[in-house]
Structures are given as C-alpha cells and as structure tokens.
Amino acid sequence: MNEAPAPQGRHTRGRVRLVAGGAITVVTAVASVVVATLAHADLSGPPGTTLKAAAERSGRYFGAAMGGDRLGDSGFLTIANREFDMMTAVNEMKPDATEPNRGQFTFGAGDAIYNWAVQHGMRVRGHTLAWHAQQPRFWGSLSGSALRQAMIDHINGVMAHYKGKLAYWDVVNEAFAENGSRRSSNLQSTGNDWIEVAFRAARAADPSVKLCYNDYNIENWSYAKTQGVYNMIRDFKSRGVPIDCVGLQTHFTGGSSLPSNFQTTLSSFAALDVDVALTEADVTNASPAQYQGLTQACTSVPRCVGITTWGIRDSDSWRGSENPLLFDRNSNAKPAYSAVVNALNAATTTVPGSSTPPSSPSTPSTPPSTPPSTPPVTGQPGACTATYRTTGSWGGGFQGEVTVTNNGSATLTGWTVNLTLASGQSLVNLWNGINSGGSGAISVRNAAYNGSLGAGASTTFGFVANGSSSTAPGDISCTSP
Ligand code: XIL
C-alpha cells in the first residue's frame, strides 16, 4: 500500500507480500458456539476502567488486530482479553492466506484467531476479501473475466466458511488512489464495476454480516481521495448496491496525522446511512492529543460504531519504530491509553439501537451462567422440535437459547424455528442461525454449518434480546424441509 504520495508528507512504504508456502490442507473447524458480546449503551453508568468497558458505555466496541503468532504470547493475550471486545486478523483472513491455490481454501490460521476471540467474548471483523495486495499467487496470472470470476469465487468460498459468524467484513480494501480516482490494479482492470460486483456477491454469500469498504488517507474531508470514496458510497447507496459501513484505517503514522476535520468526515459518511469505524488506528509516538482527538471524533458521531488499533503493544505494530500503539513493549499502558479511555467515557452520543430500552444496563462481558429462570417451553412434535430456555437475564435484557432436535429417524437437511417475542422484546444479536425479523413473530433458519441433523441429534442457537425476560418467547415451533 501507500505507493502514492500521501497528504501531510506520508511516507511511501511497501508491503511485505505474504507468500503461502506449500499446500495447507488441514482446515480447522470454526468453533460452533459463538459467544458475542454486544454493548448496551448507558451513558449514565459508571466510567469504564478498560478500553472496552469505556467504549461499551456508548454502545461502541474497542478492537485490536492480532497475528496468529500472538496466540502463543501470554503478554499479548492478557491485555487483549482484558481490554478489547473486537478482533481483526492482521494477515490470516486475507486472500493469499485463505486461498493460496485456486479452489483450495485454508482457514486454519484465521480460525485459530476467530476461535480464541469468540471464546473470550469478542466479536470479529473479517479483513479482507478483495484487495490489490496480498493476493493469491494464481490471481497474478489471471486477468479480465477470469480474474473477476476468481474474485467472486474467493468471496463465496471465504464467506461461506465464516457465514453467520462475523460482525463485519472488509469486502474491498484500498481501491482508491490519492488523487481520488480508482487505484490502478489488476482488479480495477477487470472493469470499473468490480467493487459493486464484490459487494453484491458478498451480500448474497452472507446476508447477516455488515459489508464494509476500507481505506487509508480518507480521514481528511477536504482530501481528494476522501471525496472519491465518498462519491462511490453515495452512488452505491443511490443505486441500491449493498454496503453497510466504511472503515477508515486511521493510520496517523508514516507521515500522516489527525486532521482537524476528521469528525466532519465521519459524520458526512454516516449521513449516507452507513456505519463508520476506525479500523486500523495507530499514531506516531502515540500522541495522546491525537489519540484523544480521533476517539472524540468517533464518539461524537452516532454511527461511529468502534475503534480498532492495529496491534496492542508497540512490539506488535507494523510500524513499530514509530511506537504508535497504546501499550509499550513491556505491556504498560502509555499516556495515550488514558487519553482514549477518558475520551470514550466522555462520549456524547450512543450508537443507534444500542440503548433501547433506555434503562438497559451494560451486558455482562461474559454470558451469564445462571440456571434457566423460566421453565423450558417445548414446541409441537414433528420432524423436529424446538425447546427454549433463558440462559441469563439482567435489567432490560436477557440471553436465550433454543435447542433444535431431530426426533425422526431420517437425517434433516435444514430447519426453521418460528417463535414470537413478547411485547417489548427485540433481538440484539443472534448466533448459530439466520433470523428474519427482530421482534414479534420471528423465524430462524439454520446456519450453513448446523442444518444437517442426524436422527436424534440436536443443535442450538442463541440470542441476546432487549426487554424483560419474565415472559418467555411463545408459539415456538420447528419445521424441516
Ligand atoms: C499489514 C500487516 O500489518 C503486515 O503484517 C503485512 O505485512 C502487510 O499488511 N492496511 C491494511 C492492513 O489494510 O491489512 C495492513 O496490514 C496495514 C495497512
């Protein structure tokens, strides 16, 4: 990246291209139980004393990026677990890592990060599906419609594996040049519509994940590249191209720094009806003032859903010589850490949808393990049955689990559970299934990986809902094709 001149004297820098050596044939299964925490905003609550607690007060997340090698680094893992509630893989979900050879998908490295993150109550951002860098080697020998098809196949293959599991996907990364036109690349050479084709394929592959465009040097509102990306998003929105979010990398390193109009940029993108997020933040010498400013810009814009730093300690940074992160090499929080926590705690806006009902307190950071507070409700017998139990509750919200059982003697190839949430209850998040509807009568069908149920077998899906748990969801039934 960054081949082109950058604003404020950004340095040119080459990427280290990852070359996946040898054929990796082991595909590790993604953990079947996804434990995702979602913040319930409450600005009147006590200040958070960690990054994630401070962010969750306003319904936001605080994320980090990690490489697979950090899974063996207890210093890193301790801070990650304590401070962060969103994780991005540094390289492990990129095109060269996930499809080193045509049609041969390898998810072991990405899954290891995914599994660790969800087992520690975090959500995961997928990064990235289509990019001019870190491409599979075989893309290099393709062009035109063959490369276009390889991109679509890649999106389908990777998104099928992570279907229903991720919070966001960076569908397209860094497709603009510094002058605001499209960056020239082999993907751009397949036709100017390659980006919208990628987003349409992504929406079809996994309707449950938010689809983002991600780029750097789009933080300054008066910069040509920012305007180029803005115009593309506006055009996509006007034509119904599916896009849900814009990721601003926020690398205030390599010669860039915080622009005074950053909040204007965020609110302008948000006005196009997309979420915005700071996806790869780092700041030269971890300037507390710049970290404070970038945090405040986000917390002042309701649709700014969270901030991710690109690593945790300076020793994790791709630009380590600039010491740009919130923790030093000895795992100590730096002055910028306090600046960020304080700015998060001073948030003046909450993320839309994160604070209903208004009195809802924070969701516990780990799912409650209290015994069922309501008796199980069992649906009609048939090919499959569905049984609901409440697995935890707190003032203003609860967590539920539905067990789907195949009572027949033949294997089921899919299932759909219908249930009715009581008045005042609404879904916040659902995992291990795909829902339609979020309140009243809702229907949940199997995810790609748990539709097949042998005779007598069962599976579960779970959800977090706003509202009182005193009335269990009713009218529960299960059907199978
Ligand atoms: C970087 C990684 O941190 C490096 O390990 C790798 O060698 C190159 O890529 N923008 C992005 C990220 O979208 O994927 C890049 O990550 C940093 C810049």
Image: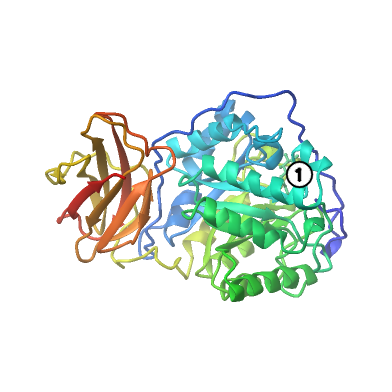
Q: Position of residue 466 (x, y in %)?
A: 29, 59
Label 1 CA crowd tier, 10 Å (few <14, some 14–19, many 20+): some
Q: Amino acid at mark 1?
A: Arg
Vertical placement of residue 237 versus 389, above or below: below
If the picture is divided into quarters, which one holds ligand 1? top right
Looking at the image, the residue that sits furthest to the left is 375
* Image quadrant occupied by the C terminus: top left
Vertical placement of residue 287 versus 379, above or below: below
Name which residue lies at 28% across and 65% down: 359
Q: Position of residue 255 (x, y in %)?
A: 82, 57
Q: Nearer the viewer, residue 69 or 389?
A: 389
Q: Specify whether residue 354 is in view.
A: yes
Residue tagged 1: 319
Q: Position of residue 314 (x, y in %)?
A: 69, 41
Q: Is residue 322 left or right of residue 267?
A: right
Q: Nearer the viewer, residue 150 or 171?
A: 150
Q: Nearer the viewer, residue 404 or 2?
A: 404
Q: Nearer the viewer, residue 149 or 241?
A: 149
Q: Position of residue 170 (x, y in %)?
A: 62, 53
Q: Is residue 166 left or right of residue 69?
A: left
Name which residue lies at 75% across and 52% down: 284
Helix, strand or loop at label 1? It is loop
Q: Is residue 22 left or right of residue 57?
A: right
Q: Specify whether residue 307 is in view.
A: no
Colouring of the image: rainbow
Vertical placement of residue 419 versus 160, above or below: below
Q: Is residue 317 left or right of residue 348?
A: right
Name which residue lies at 31% across and 68% down: 358
Vertical placement of residue 50 versus 344, above or below: above
